[in-house]
Amino acid sequence: MAIRSVLKMGDPRLLARAQEIEDFDTPALHALIEDMRETMLARDGVGLAAPQIGESLRLVIFGFDANPRYPDADSVPYTVLINPVLTPLSDETEEDWEGCLSIPGLRGLVPRWKRLHYRGFDPQGQPIERSVEGFHARVVQHECDHLDGVLYPMRMRDLSRLGFVDVLFPGREEAAGE
């Protein structure tokens, strides 16, 4: 398995809609998931979408116990989610700061649904369904946006709230390679 390069904003592959996964529980799928996990962990990410490493597939991973990039965030269970479908549970949204491995060193204030239900499949093709809120809901929405070619600045209401981490949050540095 390998740590992969992460595409950066400006790469047109990040703007394309990813393809559905049809074959589950294959060696190639398991190898891709392991590469994604190693890549996410090596960069202190809380999630990663397959398009971020150049694989146009509807696959996201996310989860952490504690993360230096989001020191105040509640933990999120490690999840591999394939062909996800998101449904908001209300019209209520909230704004919070987001970063992205494809937009290193920057953060922006992004509106997201506060509560949502997501469904999809695990690597073996078994259904996954969860209703979540807060940071868990934010992470899922952020990662699934990548599957539709959406980067978080495209969701921002006010670009004056986009800035470098070291300016917005003095004393907090992004992880190496960010």
Image (cartoon, helix red, strand yellow):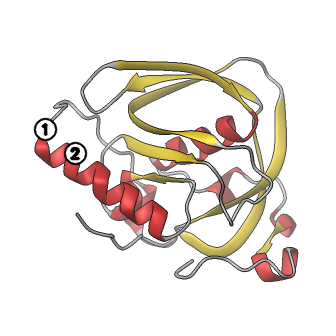
Residue 140, placed above or below residue 11: above
Q: Which residue is mark 1?
A: 26
Residue 58, image x, y percentages? 35, 40
Give the quarter of the image for residue 18: top left
Q: Quadrant of the C terminus?
A: bottom right
Residue 71 shown left or right of residue 169 in the figure: left
Looking at the image, residue 175 lies above or below residue 79: below
What residue is drawn where x is 56% and y is 20%?
A: 130
Give the residue drawn at x 62%, y 48%: 65
Nearer to the camera, 102 or 45: 45
Q: Position of residue 36 (x, y in %)?
A: 36, 57
Residue 32 lies, in percent from the top left, at 25, 53
Residue at screen point 39% across, 46% down: 17
Mark 2 residue element: helix
32 left or right of 116 in image: left
Quadrant in the rendering for residue 55: bottom left
Q: CA distance from mark 1 to mark 2?
A: 6 Å
Three-letter amino acid code of the residue under disc 2: His
The answer to whether one can see residue 55 in this image is no
Classify mark 1: residues with Cα within 10 Å, few (<14), some (14-19) or many (20+): few
- The residue located at (62%, 40%) in the rendering is 76
Q: How far from the left and from the top, in percent, is residue 78? A: 49, 41
Q: Are marks 1 and 2 in contact (CB under 8 Å)?
A: yes
| Badge count | 2
135 or 147: which is nearer to us? 135
**Label disc, if present, on residue 72 of the rendered structure:** none
| Residue matched to label 2 | 30
